[in-house]
Image (cartoon, helix red, strand yellow):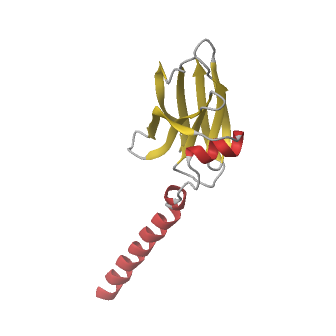
Amino acid sequence: MRGLTRRLAISMLAATVAALTLASPAQAATNPFTAAQACNNDFGGAWAYASDGHRSITAPDGTRVGDVYLMYNSATAYNCVVTLKRVAVGSTTGASAGVRVEGASWAYDSGNFKYYAAIQRSARDKCVMYEGEVLYATSWQGAGRYSWGNCG
């Protein structure tokens, strides 16, 4: 009887470890890109982090699923918004980056991406809002700044 109980306990432990190991790679992978690298990859140029230009994207269960950044290129007066995934990194899953320039509508880069979504818009002498979303399980999680800022 004692041997059967021990084997059952070991089997349950092994199953738990296997389940955790299989479930964690999408969560555990680190995004190899920074926001500046993503803007440079997609649009070229030198990008600086804007003041008040970062929001963490957190799911209701407390999981940090991504980060959205507002970047600025002083040479071109363009803003770049990047949503870096923190879950399912390397897998093609939903992500979105959005920017609204004063006097214009929201513009988005939205789709299925391995690492990030990125969009740029000219904002010379204008203020901007930004937002990002990441698909987590079956629902979109988002964050952003919905008031005008980073004017210039």
In the image, farthest residue toward the left: 2
Residue 66: % across, % down: 50, 44
Q: Is residue 112 above or below residue 147?
A: below
Task: Name the image quarter holding residue 8.
Answer: bottom left
Between 101 and 67, the one lying in front of the other is 101
- Quadrant where the N terminus sits is bottom left
Q: Does 111 sit above or below residue 123?
A: below
Q: Is residue 138 visible?
A: no
Q: Residue at x 48, y 45 (%)?
A: 65
In this rendered view, identify the residue nearer to me: 123 or 92.
123
Nearest the eye: 31 or 58: 31
Residue placed furthest toward the front: 75
| Residue 19 coordinates in the image, percent (x, y) | 48, 65
Residue 146 visible in the picture: yes
Q: Is 123 drawn above or below residue 17 in the view shown?
A: above
Task: Count the marks.
Answer: 0
Give the residue displayed 54% in from the left and 57% down from the top: 26
Residue sitting at x 38%, y 83%: 7
* Image-based side of 146 in relation to 80, left or right: left
Q: Quadrant of residue 61?
A: top left
Q: Is residue 118 above or below residue 6?
A: above
Q: Could you tell me which quadrant the C terminus lies in?
A: top right
Q: Residue at coordinates 48% horizontally, 70% vertically from top-left?
A: 18
Position in image of residue 88 (x %, y %): 57, 52
